[in-house]
Amino acid sequence: MCYVSLSMKKKLKEKTASLDSKWGQGIVPNRNVGRIIDSARIAVRKLEAIGYKPILFMGKKDKKASNKWVADIITHLPLTSTTKNFLEKMRRAYEFLLTKEQQPNTDPSAEPDNPTMEQGDSPVEGMGHSQDEEQHSSLAMEQRDHT
């Protein structure tokens, strides 16, 4: 798996350096947020067109609760009951990560290099395949094998 935030090509580095919080503060009052989100949707479609299967998570602070985040997902996947179920769990997991990231860490040496969630701390417990999903997957594989 690849866990890279952004590519570090020289040209991209220069571009991202110009996108600081001042830039973001100028976007909101000028009502250009919708254009940027539309560009993200188009980028997801373009990635799909060249053979990638992207899922884009976007989180922002909840207006009702200052310590809570809400996330949206942009994906190419058709919304079946299975994809809806898994994407909802992934969305909750992403919101959980954003909330944890926001919390101040009093002792940076206390954080492990490879953090793990403690039992009962995860918003996506039971994310394994249900019996129905396994039967559906098996059926799909059988149909593919017979064609």
Image: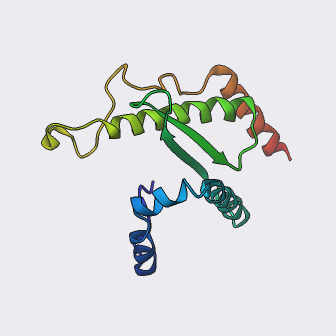
Residue 31: image quadrant is bottom right
Residue lying at 47% horizontally and 58% vertically, measured from the top left: 24
Q: Residue furthest bottom?
A: 11
Q: Of 84 and 108, which appears nearest the observer?
A: 108
Q: x and y percent of residue 75 in the render? A: 67, 48
The residue closer to the viewer here, 1 or 122, is 122
- Looking at the image, is 73 positioned above or below residue 24? above
Is 96 placed left or right of 40 in the picture? left
- Residue located at (73% from left, 64% from top): 49
Picture residue at 21% right of the left edge, 38% below the top: 105
Q: Quadrant of the N terminus?
A: bottom left
Residue 113: x and y, percent?
23, 46
Q: How many numbered circles does the render carry?
A: 0
The residue sitting at 34% across, 40% down in the picture is 101
Side of 106 relative to 60 (left or right): left
Lateral position of residue 70 relative to residue 9, left or right: right
Can you say whether 2 is above or below 142 in the image?
below
- The answer to whether 120 appears left or right of 36 in the picture is left
Residue 14: percent from left, percent from top: 41, 77
Within the image, what quadrant is residue 135 found in? top right
| Location of residue 111 in the rendering, given as x and y in whole percent from the top left corner | 20, 40
Name the outermost residue toward the right. 147
What colouring does the structure picture have?
Answer: rainbow
